[in-house]
Amino acid sequence: MPPHARTSRPWPALAVAVAAMLGLAVVLPPEIRAAGEQRAADDDAHAAMVAIAPGGSVELDQLPAEHRELYLAAAEHREAFTAVRCYCGCEDFLDHPDLLTCFVRPGDGAWERHATGCGVCLGEARDVVADLDRGLPLDEIITRIDARYGGITT
């Protein structure tokens, strides 16, 4: 029988390849396996963030008192809130370039709903306000926020 007429049977090679991959999964260092598991957990957390803290507008009278204070502080201290990056990941799913846009919607100036449902945004805002109250210069506030929250999404 000529070679081109032979029927190729890839099953043995495929079985060996699958067995090798399964073997690798077992012998991979735990750090590499954990990295894959962490990525899956991060993807789940991102989806949860979108569900819990979507964009849109909100009325301040619907918010808890502390949240209202932080929204008003964001509007009052626009320069500081614009200079600080938000580290919750909202730049990816809401196109927020800075912390101010987590609280104040660009364009119409309405209150942005996202921040009230996001612990990272609220935490950063608390820290910015506290640092402003301490009289810290803006460059130091930025450095402190980057150091504290930078590892969350970068």
Image: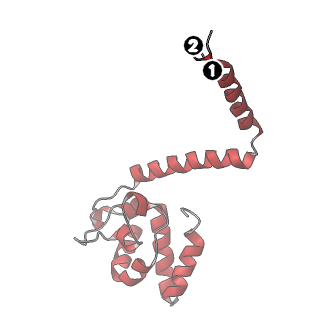
Circle 2 packing at 10 Å, graded few (<14), some (14-19), many (20+), is few
Residue 151 drawn at (x, y percent): 59, 65
Q: Residue at x 65, y 24 (%)?
A: 14
Is residue 77 among what the camera can see? Answer: no
Numbered disc 1: secondary structure:
loop
Residue 95 drawn at (x, y percent): 36, 63
Give the residue at mark 2: 5
Amino acid under disc 1: Pro
Mark 2 or 1: in front is 2
Residue 10 position (above or below residue 131) = above
Residue 54 position (above or below residue 91) = above
Residue 31 position (above or below residue 57) = above
Numbered disc 2: secondary structure:
helix
Position of the C terminus by quadrant: bottom right
The one of 59 and 77 positioned closer to us in this rendering = 77
The one of 96 and 145 positioned closer to us in this rendering = 96
Give the residue at mark 1: 10
Describe the colour scheme in one phrase.
secondary structure
Horizontal relation, residue 12 to residue 95: left or right: right
Q: Give the Cα distance between marks 2 and 1.
A: 15 Å
**N-term-proximal mark, 2 vs 1:** 2
Amino acid under disc 2: Ala
Which residue is outermost to the front? 2
Circle 1 packing at 10 Å, graded few (<14), some (14-19), many (20+), is few
Q: Residue at x 34, y 82 (%)?
A: 76
Quadrant in the picture for residue 16: top right
Residue 143 drawn at (x, y percent): 56, 80
Q: How many marks?
A: 2
Q: Residue at x 72, y 31 (%)?
A: 20
Position of the N terminus by quadrant: top right
